[in-house]
Amino acid sequence: MIPFSKVAYYTLGCKLNFSETSSISRDLMEAGYARVDFFDHPDVYVINTCSVTDNADKKCRKLVKDALNHSPKAFVVIIGCYSQLKPKEISEIPGVSLVLGAQEKFNISKYLKNINTGDAVKVINSSIKEIEEFVPAFSNNERTRSFLKVQDGCDYHCSFCTIPLARGKSRSSSVVKIVATANEIVESGIQEIVLTGVNIGDFGNGTDESFFDLLKELNNIKGLNRIRISSIEPNLLTKEIVTLVSNSNKIMPHFHIPLQSGSNEILKAMRRKYDREHYQSKVELIHQLIDNCCIGVDVIVGYPGETEDYFLETFNFLNELNIAYLHVFTYSERDNTTALRSDQVVPMADRTKRRKMLQILSEKKKRKFYSDNISNIQSALFEGENKDGFISGFTNNYIRVKTEFDAKKINTINKIKLISLDEDCVMTGSIVKQEELLTNSYSN
């Protein structure tokens, strides 16, 4: 492999994947590779894949094809969950040069040095059972926020999920090391750190440290203005965590809590570690301790055995629950999962209908949550894009708000009064001057 090659990246999937792609790109830059745009005729493409949905193969094939259309002689490297789960399948995609597993992707420069034009595709991946090392990662491509990986892998064995097979057992760094990385991120000018992982509430598993311990230390970092928790399992969301968030000016009043089903029968079949009553108690606890908190929910429709009655249990449960939005997933059959053994298959037409029903419900929930915040004064972190004369960002409680563009506002936190809601469910607001704050009460 020639030195100082140009490398382009494409990331599919979650925030964890984005943090890892960013760290891998920094490692390659240190090795002499330049990062370029996907369409800038790179010498190497690195495609970081996802395995959450059933169309990973289709997405991967399309990306490889698009890459080689722009740079026909480029080497194409596939990494990520899909490459760990189905390396042989990926190696058969025309144009792929190298397939790296869950551990090997972090040594990509080593393997690139040994690739030559005309070589047969190479597949290098270890057994997922052998992977014990936690490899830190964080993103720095966005000026306003950074995704910080604090945990990897999962010891849960939900019947629909392949993540433990793709990422291995639960593991994490120490509080001291994560805090040191967070300080490095703050020094770069980042305003918000989003904590990410496969199961971040399991941080410190097997040690005397916990996710609560991590949050306490991060909360004390000088210069760090915002901390956001990406997603946390309901059984790991403790009262002490919620209380800490309620008393913190840094940890955002925003929780994303996977539910997956509002039917206890389906939750049991999924091998989830809670029931709907437990989930509801966590939502009620949050609202009891934190005013105006944003709560997002993951839910799966069409799981085997989900009858119409079971789905309606989910729909009605979510309809009555005090939440702000949903992420709706259609169940897809995955190899090597126990759910695949069920013969109670839900027709795809029913899955599609149920997904649409919950998406409509999500839109209604989000619009209500936003509307309930009209006239409030919130803190918003503004991003860099000038879109139709507006600059936008997110409030502490995760409301997308826009105001008249001002380049000086980029990567700054401002008090803004929420005024009205447009048809795309984006809030319009006006910056509040300091003298106005002295005479008005406001929300954080």
Image: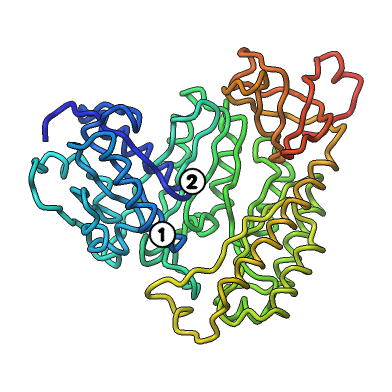
Closer to the camera, 10 or 139? 10
Q: How far apart are marks 1 and 2 (CA)?
A: 14 Å
On the image, which quarter does residue 20 sit in?
Answer: top left
Q: Neighbour class for label 2 at 10 Å: few (<14), some, many (≥20)?
A: many
Secondary structure, mark 2, is helix
Whole-percent x, y for residue 317 in the image: 77, 68
Q: In the rendered image of this protein, does residue 146 appear above or below residue 413? A: below
| Residue at image mark 2 | 15
Query: How far across and down, in percent of the image, does residue 244 sit?
Result: 68, 47
- The residue indicated by pointer 1 is 51
Extreme residue in the right direction: 439
Q: Position of residue 153 (x, y in %)?
A: 41, 60
Judging from the image, the colouring scheme is: rainbow
Above or below, 2 relative to 77? above
Observer-side mark, 1 or 2, equals 1
Q: What element carries label 1?
A: loop
Picture coordinates of residue 426, whole percent (x, y): 73, 35
Q: Nearer the viewer, residue 90 or 141?
A: 90
Quadrant position of the N terminus in the picture: top left
Residue at x 27%, y 46% (from the top left corner): 106
Task: Give the side of residue 313 with respect to residue 55, left or right.
Answer: right
Residue shown at 72%/62% (left/top)?
Answer: 282
- The amino acid on which the numbered mark 2 sits, given as a three-letter code, is Lys
In this picture, is 238 found above or below 247? below
